[in-house]
Amino acid sequence: MIDRFRSLPMARSAVIGGRSLTDLVRNVISLAIMVGLGVAVGFRFHSDAGRILAGMLLILAFGYSLSWMNTAIGISAGDPESAQNAATGPAFLLMFASNAIVPASTLPGWLQPFARNQPLGVTASAVRELFEGGAAAHDAWVPLAWSAGPPMPSTRGQRPSKRLPRGAGSLPCRCPVPRRR
């Protein structure tokens, strides 16, 4: 599939950019479903509409930055299996060593500072403050800084784009290919 994209006259970054925008759209749909289901089973926001919207935008910004982090891992990996294995470790570390699932005070003492100050931990705390109506002015800027932190990966690490001759794609073509003299 990627070979077909390489044969088209388009920028190499278009595939990566399109993939990241697709991730963002999928995150918007997932967030809408989760909020809808949460409200259906009894979850209630204790804040005004502006803070609720800010919390949801903060969640989307954090998810978008994670998609770029995973894109960078995927570009630097040699094959799909290596990329998946390399991306699993940071995801587990961020999730299970954070205050997103349990309060940080219930974690071991040596893990509490990390859980409170890592990207997912500060994002979860800020979103809780925004959804519960607390003072989240300071707390919201830290996750935004974390979200802006992962640099967008460069396409320079990809193989150079080769223009394939007409009919030389990955699928067999029965049309004659003109020979160059």
Image (tube, grey):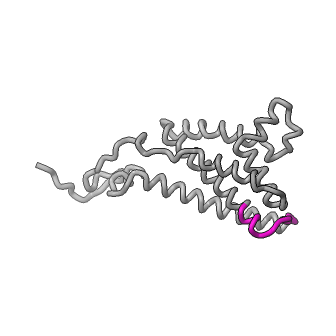
In-front residue for pair 123/160: 123
Q: Quadrant of residue 59?
A: bottom right
> Does residue 47 appear to the left or right of 59 in the view shown?
right
Picture coordinates of residue 130, whole percent (x, y)? 79, 59
Q: Residue at left 79%, top 50%?
A: 125
**Membership of 147 in magenta stretch:** no
- Which stretch is magenta? 42-54
Tell me which corner region of the image, top left, top right, bottom left or bottom right, holds residue 104.
top right
Image location of residue 126, percent across then percent down = 76, 53
Quick check: is 49 in the magenta stretch? Answer: yes
Name the residue at 21% across, 57% down: 176
Q: Among all residues in the image, which is located at the extreme left?
A: 181
Residue situated in front as seen by the camera: 165 or 126: 126
Rendered position, 128 above or below 74: below
Question: Residue 55: image x %, image y %?
Answer: 73, 60
Which one is nearer the viewer's eye here, 161 or 138? 138
* x and y, in percent, of residue 46 in the image: 86, 65
Which image quarter: residue 119?
A: top right
14 relative position to 48: left or right? left
Q: Is residue 80 left or right of residue 27?
A: left
Image position of 171 with respect to 79: above or below: below
